[in-house]
Amino acid sequence: MASFKKTQIRSLPKIGQKVTADTLYWRKLNFPVTVKEFGPIDYIDVMPIEPYFIAVSSAAKVQIYNPITHQVHRHFTRFKEAAYGASIRSDGKLVIAGCDEGHVKLFDIGSKSLLRIFKGHKGPVHRCKFTTDNVHVVSFSDDKSVALWDLPSETEIIKFSEHSDYVRAGCVSSISSDLFLSGSFDHTVKLYDARSPTGSTISVDHGSPVESVLMYPSNSIFVSVGGTELRVWDMLAGGRLLARVSQHHKTITCLHLASDGKRLVTGGLDRHAKIYDVQSYQVVHTLDFPSPVLSLGITPDDFTVVAGMANGLISMQHRQTQAEARALNPKQSLKVQKKSQTAYRFRLNADFRSVNRTFNPATDVEVATKTDTNFVSRYDMFLRKFQYSKALDTVLTPYIRKKKPAITVGVMHELIRRNGLKSALAGRDDSSLSSILTFLARNINDPSHANIIIQVANTLLEIYESSSLTPQSEKLFLQLQEHVNREVEYVKHLMEIEGMLHILLASTTTQARRSSTYVVQGSPVKPMLPSAAAAANATMIFNVG
Amino acid sequence: MVKMANKKTRGPDKTQANTSDIVVKKLDDATDIVRQPPVFTNDSKYICIASGRQIGIYSVESADKVHSLEEHTFDVIGLAIKDDNILLSCDASGETIEWNINNGTTLKKAPLVVAGIKEFHSFHYPGNGKVLVATPSTYTTNMSSLWIVDSHTRPRKLFADIKSTPHSIAFGCNQGNGSLVVVALQDHSVVVKDITNGVDKKHMTDQRKFTCVALHSEKLIMATGDISGRILIWHDFVHKSRPVKTVYHWHTLPVNSVCFSSEGEYLYSGGSEKVMVKWRLGMSRKQFLPRMGSSIKYIVNAPDNICVATSHSDNAIRFIDSTNKINRAIIGLVKHDPIRGFADTEPIKESVMPTGLVFDPRSHGIFFNAQAGFLQLFDPQKNSLIFNMDVANRNVLTDERNLVIGNAEVLRVAVSPTGEWLATLEVWSNMSAGYHDMNLKFWRYDAVQANYELNTDVTMPHQDRVTALCFQPGLLGTEMPCLVSIGRDLKFKIWRLVDDTDIYRQKESWSCDVAGDFRKLTPSALSFSEDGSLMAIAFQDTVTLWDPTSINLNTTLSHTLVQEPIELMEFGRDNCFRYLVCASKSALYAWDVISQGLVWKVGQLHSSVRCLVPDPKSCYMAAVLQNSEVFVFSPSSSKPVHSVPKMNSSEPIAALFVPRPNPLASGPEWLINSRLLIVDDQQEFLCVDDVSSAGFNQKLTTPISHMDSLPWTPFSAMKAEKQISAAKQLVPVVHQTSGIQGYKSVQSLLETSASALPPMSRICSLFMSDLMIKHGPKAVTAKVNSVDRTSTDLPLSNGHIDSKTQDFSEETTLQKLLTLDCQWLVETVK
């Protein structure tokens, strides 16, 4: 005996944002904790090792925050004017920061003491970085130069002055201590090798002032942002442009890698942070902030996302822990808990109260075989019994007909197939008739269900055209008519617009043809090779000529 | 032997094939097993089933075939168990054979002699050497006369003008005196005869026609079913002229079969509702077994009363155990019930087997219709059903008494060239409601699960009936497959597999890429060239050639000589790739797509061409006419290489060339690698094959003898006599169909006025390179048939690879009728 096949409910996919693994992942960030600073947040750097301290440079100080307590752990204020681009060494012991007077200052985080001052730049230093070997420092200055310093001897090793405008972006390679990258307001991004002091090895044109650059951990690709564009460059191919992504509508200011280098995050003045997949450069999620984002920091475990904004706000968001999630949404967590519970599947044979011997799970526990409860919905039950009116009644309850109209339409479709629609619709009283009529009026404009709804409406009219109706039902029939009329008007409008578009399209194609003719005539170099578009009517072209 | 075969296949057999070697065979194994009711053996361990000329003995426990008894030369009309292990069978010519059930051997053969009658309808064996046979009635057609044949006395006619179905005759014993009681059905009455006592009775009820009758095994109780679904139980009907009747009425449709259980406590009945009802006699209780899959034809009870077998119209016999559950089934090749409501408006093919035969390159099986909404895959080599697949996935709906309720039917099937994709089109339409529903489904074969998975379901792919579906052949594995559908809404649509991949999941689905039409004409036929580079769509009498990748109209072909709408169209294969064979109602003709001329035409056919099938392994093509004539021809010429005269009264529905596993040792070229399979309107399979090949039972492997020259050692046994690698280098075939090399350059040079031409030094190299024949590694040289090419005035070059497909200017109709020869057909027939 073949089992009864369920009625097919044809549900179309919903248009709109899909819930993906990434949106779920990034949605788990808690409500942000905000701290107000006095000036715009210039730069945020995250300590690469635990406890993931966050160095924030704003106005004339550098502060190191504890990401868990949100408290200031250390702050360094030995700057006359603004401090820029504080960056923590990979071992988490030293911090370096540039400043307006053109110095680069090195502090010990533990003792707060100023250890070194690298003097030599003539303009403010906006970014500075430790190289991978931890004994060199690279600084990027507004005097259009990039300098490499020796940390122990406090001396300048090499200086590149190739840029023609402020250098406001820079990063170092994570593999080689000799490679570093600079981005400047002169639209170029340059790659330097300290071993070749003659000049930059790669120089690429970004097309707008470069705000931030980033080198992938593999060191084969680097990314630059500036203007509203993100550009991806192939380092191994000598600076070949791999991708151009423009997802922000205002200047992109900062760049960060997240999720172990699988996601790229950009923040911009449009108050958004976009998260990209690094393979396809598709945006997988967007984070919103209250004011323009100037700097971003994400801890390596994605636990904390810190954003610095133009109005001096620092927002710190934590990832929800399981306990928090449970506390926030007790209903859902209960459901999850229930699902994972296996207690019902087991039954103890031994009576608990009288157990006085050792418990043997092999013999005392009886595992109930999982019975596949083949759930049959009510309408299927009635359809199976050929009770068509009742089946239709069950899907006309307010909940189903409003929230899940696909089910109602699916059952109506099945009734049409079974030739039982007439008997299901006939002999209805006022209230049930009104529920059908309101359903039809509501859904007759839906193109995905229209053909079935129209069929049902026709049958309904056929049945009730001669019977006397109450004023209420009559009103509803008129309402249905009005809906249909409106839809007809609407479709007429659309067809008019389509016709106009056809005219436009037709005129453009003829113009394109004429212009291609012109090109063929105007280029005497290759008269024998018409373009692909012109090839179709090649004979015509030559006749014109 | 092997060497010879290879030589033959390599060099085409030029000699005219001896046509007498080619025979048309009927495939017996594929016949249905439900034409006659099955018979249980006395110990209920085996069940005997008649299928055509064969009798199969199956184990009830496992539903496996134990013996196949093949001695009859005509269709078996009745089976009976004579003794504990002796089976008695009778065929339509009256020959009776006794078989030993245990070992399947023949015990005795004897002809039935009944007043010189040569044809028999049904056969029953009440016991004691008496035999009941039904013969055609002398006066009325479709009626039978019932005779009793005894070894001692002359055959005696019991009844005249009774119904000829197997279920209209029943026999039993009169308990009172042990005499034989025979009952038979006439349209509105039941006739009863007590043989020993000579009592005759005729019972009538009302105007409802009887359909089936059964007798209780112990008591004198008779059950009859009628067309209104009513079952009557008659008590003491032999002696009383107005017997007491009990009415059991549950069925709404005619009762097809009634059967008493062996102990007589229950009555089973079944009909087209697909429900078996188990009545308890004398009580109002009844049990149902619903959704049995297909309408019930016969119900047979096992003597031990444990098992009931039901024969269904989908060619299956199902066993129902005592808990009222189906636990086993013997399934044969399913016959498709003709679609009702189609018969009057559509050709017969559309209602009997709308999908036709579709070859599956993956399994080497054939797809065609099973029961409504199902599709079956049949293995022609092993002659067995591979699987039966539910395409519609809907509950099977049954008719109501005065209302035909249709089910979803699979109308079109297409298989991708690699066999990975299966496209099915199912249609459900309600003529009375004026509503129809159409679904185009794409299934992907999952090699791990070994089944097809639904990938995409498109609702209403066309606004009207879809005429044809075809996958683009010749694509490499890396390219996305492509399907073309044409419909009566005047559109053709191109469906492509779209990679819906976002970063989260690999997901592919099919979507409509292009929808096009041509001058608001109805597309009627569709064909791809073998390499997939050219798509031909016939719009009434015009053939349009399209480039499938860019959907540019390359050219249109039409001619004043051929103005009937094209019904069938196929590209030639192999070295006839340039020919496009079209069939209209009364003519068959071929276009040359390179020179764009009509090559030949055969007009005034005896009847219309029903199928046009190309052989995938050679250049030949077969045309099957409606009157079952078959012509095999090469598309390059109108002369057939073989023709099969009219076979019998049956009408062909579909045909297919099925590749052979091993090439034939000798025979005409078109038969070496494949054979032609034809299905007629009774859904019987016919095979046009060489007489030397053993048909469907041929061995799949050719024995290889060891070399005689070497002494036989264990090592010599390891060395193969001949090493053949079956792995073929896959070289995509590309046909040059884009016209004449450099023709365009020459023409443009000539058409441009001399004053407008650039300096000769500039264009010279370009012009020369256009004229050059570029030899690629995959070049295929087209054989230019000198016979057909005599009168072309254009310089024809050999085929070559050209990276840039040249577009024809629209509407070039270089109509050149080269040979016009319509006489061969008339001659061959007469």
Image (spheres, coloured by chain):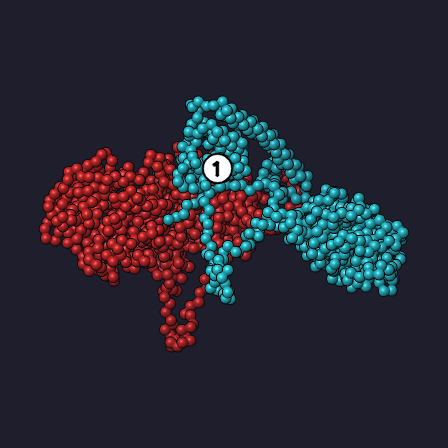
Q: Residue at x 17, y 55 (%)?
A: B110
Chain letter for the cyan colouring in the rendering: A
- Residue A508 percent coordinates (x, y): 63, 34
Image quadrant where residue B694 sits = bottom left
Question: Residue B102 versus residue A290: which sits nearer the camera?
Answer: A290
Can you say whether A511 is above or below B640 in the image?
above
Tell me the residue that label 1 is attached to.
A395
Question: Residue A91 versus residue B803: which sits nearer the camera?
Answer: A91
> Does the image show residue B604?
yes
Q: Is residue B731 left or right of residue A519?
A: left
- Residue A39 percent coordinates (x, y): 83, 46
Q: Residue at x 82, y 61 (%)?
A: A110
Q: Residue at x 49, y 22 (%)?
A: A471
User: Could you tell me which chain the residue with mark 1 belongs to?
Assistant: A
Q: Amino acid at mark 1?
A: Val
**Which color was chain B given?**
red
Q: Label 1 crowding class (10 Å Cα cut-off): few <14, some 14-19, many 20+?
A: many
> Does the image show residue B530?
no
Picture quarter with the C terminus of chain A: top right
Question: Residue A260 versus residue B494: which sits nearer the camera?
Answer: A260
- Residue B111 percent coordinates (x, y): 16, 53
- Residue B262 percent coordinates (x, y): 24, 51
Q: Is residue A164 left or right of residue A506?
A: right
